[in-house]
Amino acid sequence: MDARLHEAEDEVALSRGEVRQLRTEVSIEKKQKEDLQLRLSAQKEELEGEFAAEREELESDYQKQVDDMFFFSYRCCMKKHDIKWDVPSILPGEENKLLDKPTP
């Protein structure tokens, strides 16, 4: 009987040791998981900031390209129609005549 009691006590002590070891491992893994979450959150914020900056830069470049195309098209149209200046070439007296003409 004493042998079985000692054997049971040894098993209980062994089980308690295993439980302590498992708790330690769980707490270590939990801390590692928290550290990983913090690193990932910081990395996510950094990437979002970089993405926002790159997006603004791309939008700015795109708008510049649109503006350049508009001015290029405008200049091509002027050249095609042999327009030398950006102002109308209507003489002062001719303007009234043009306004008085009926439109088709």
Image: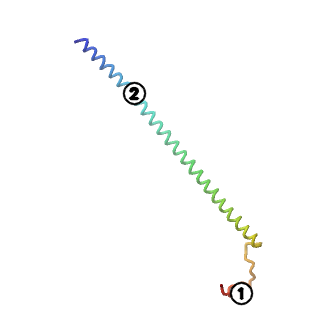
Task: Name the residue at 60% across, 56% down.
Answer: 59
Q: Secondary structure at mark 1?
A: helix
Residue with the mark numbered 1? 97
Q: Is residue 12 above or below residue 63?
A: above
Task: Name the residue at 48% across, 37% down.
Answer: 36
The residue type indicated by label 1 comes to Lys
Residue with the mark numbered 2? 24
Q: Quadrant of residue 81?
A: bottom right
Query: Foreground residue, 26 or 79?
Result: 79
* Number of numbered callouts drawn: 2
Disc nearest the viewer among 1 and 2: 1
Q: Is residue 48 above or below residue 70?
A: above
Farthest left residue? 1
Quick check: 21 left or right of 76?
Answer: left
- Residue 66 in percent (x, y) is at 65, 61
Picture disc at residue 5: none
